[in-house]
Image (tube, rainbow, N blue to C red):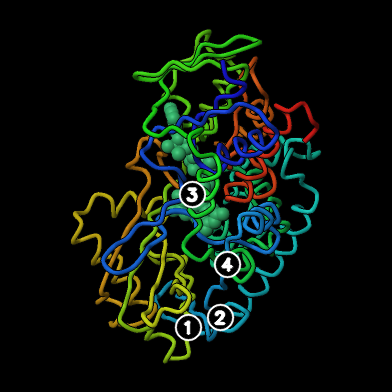
Amino acid sequence: MHDVVIVGAGVTGLTAAWRLAEAGRDVVVLEARDRVGGRLLTERHGPADFEMGGQWLAPDQTALLALLDELGLPTFARYRTGQSLYLDKAGVARRFDDELPVPEATAVAIETLTKALDALTAEVDPQRPWNHPDAERLDRISFRAWLEQQCDDEEACDNIALYIGPAMLTKPAHAFSALQALQMAASAGSFSNLVDADFILDRRVAGGLQSVSLALAERLRERVRLGVDVEHVDWDEHSATVHAAGAVVGARQVVLAVPPPVLRRIRFSPGLPAERRMAQDHQSFGLVIKVQAAYETPFWREQGLSGTGFGPYQLVHEVYDNTPEGDDRGFLVGFVSDVNVDSVDRLDEVARRARVLGSLAAYFGDAARDPVHYVESDWQHQELTGGAYGSTFDLGGLSRYGEALLRPVGALEFGSSDVAGHGFLHVDGAIRVGEEIAARVLGRTP
Ligand code: FDA
């Protein structure tokens, strides 16, 4: 019998495993896929590497920064020299430096909403948002309805909704609560931080963010077993046994390091407590397609553009220069989110590519229609993930079930970036959750 079995070799599972192994525990990691990294993946397409999952890090993501340091992984800054673009409702591309080029009244309304959100966010503990004195009321109202209660400028509401809805939770702002929006903002320190692309999308890891998982797996060596899809877990207060095709592994504790919706694939004996199952059932994945296009040159830079663009009414609602450090070619990365995913997912590959590149052309002109390479990553089609970037609660779910998602059950611990406080839905959060689980297993207060 092992000390600990960890199910899932994403950053959460690998971090927990490495901290436990360092402390001398006998630990095994079982991963269903034939690779480590989960929602982190660097793939070669043509003559270039593309990050298909997570890629950016922010200066306040200190758990990730410390681990990068420990693993000796260098970072580089996102290219951001030049003007950004804002596409208005009529599809007109307007250049700007700092302030969105919107009508004066809309700019004032955006500033007022930002101040209100910063003030409320400062009162919310991202680790325990349900403790806010007004948590139940804020969890009962959708973020969109909350915005419309504060402000009657539609374009201001559309822009603020975009930052947390399509851009972060990848759900329409009517599908999650104001409290869930506040937790997202609080997890990044403030609403202003979250909407500041220069902050939240500051740097990348040379060679890709998946290097974090690869470096941890290299240290864990034969403790990581790939291609083991855990189907069934028998558990009690003191131990658990994990079953997969061709493998039965026992341990004093089992860590399920998978996002809550993916836990539904696993059967438990005895069944999990009802509150735990309800909590999982009220969390669902958002949807986003990450689209990347490589060009012979970064032609937008010659026009004084940074490659950054926002368009709340566009198919590709945000776009950035994604050129790897030292590369002479030009790379753009954009995102198609939530209900827009539904519409393009029904198209065939050729038609979808044409629509996406048409949206990039609305930002950067016709040159954007003709990339050398075009790559999409759409995680909803992978059963072992089920969406992107992460999973969040439906209306009322966070205040009702949030705490239950954090609670261990008998010999079982649960965790992923989707239950993090600081770094919620980010790799920083996955590391924090992995370290907290390891500390609990070791009997230390995290
Ligand atoms: P993760 O889902 O990675 O790992 C779970 C693992 O469990 C997987 O490897 C899965 O195969 C395995 N598993 C599931 N069921 C199993 C079973 N029954 N048996 C065995 N194994 C099983 N973050 C960030 O910080 N910056 C960014 O720029 C982005 N951008 C971004 C873009 C896209 C497209 C995506 C999809 C995600 C991001 N993210 C991000 C989010 C980030 O990638 C994510 O928060 C973490 O990688 C999640 O790590 P976890 O280990 O918590 O879960």
Q: Quadrant of residue 297?
A: bottom left
- The answer to the question of whether label 3 and label 2 lie on touching residues, with beta carbons closer than 8 A, is no
Residue indicated by mark 3: 214
Residue indicated by mark 4: 75
Residue indicated by mark 1: 94
Question: Disc number at residue 155?
Answer: none
> Picture coordinates of residue 390 (x, y %)?
51, 44
Q: Residues within 10 Å of mark 1 (few under 14, many from 20)?
A: some
Distance CA(mark 3)–CA(mark 4) = 16 Å
| Marks 1 and 4, the one that precedes in the sequence | 4
Which of 444 and 331 lies nearest the eye of the viewer?
444
Distance CA(mark 1)–CA(mark 3) = 42 Å
Q: Please, what secondary structure does the residue beneath circle 4 have?
A: strand
- Foreground label between 2 and 4: 4
Q: Residue at x 53, y 86 (%)?
A: 82
- Which amino acid type is shown beneath numbered disc 4? Thr
Q: Is residue 222 visible?
A: yes
| Marks 3 and 4, the one that precedes in the sequence | 4
> Picture coordinates of residue 271 (x, y %)?
52, 11
- Which amino acid type is shown beneath numbered disc 2? Pro
Q: Is residue 216 above or below residue 115?
A: above
Q: Residue at x 56, y 60 (%)?
A: 163
Pick the quarter of the image with the C terminus. Answer: top right
Q: Is residue 167 visible?
A: no
Q: Residues within 10 Å of mark 2 (few under 14, many from 20)?
A: some
Distance CA(mark 2)–CA(mark 4) = 32 Å
Pick the quarter of the image with the N terminus. Answer: top right
Q: Is mark 4 within 8 Å of ligand 1?
A: no
- Foreground label between 3 and 4: 3
Residue indicated by mark 2: 101
- The answer to the question of whether label 2 and label 4 lie on touching residues, with beta carbons closer than 8 A, is no
| Marks 2 and 1, the one that precedes in the sequence | 1
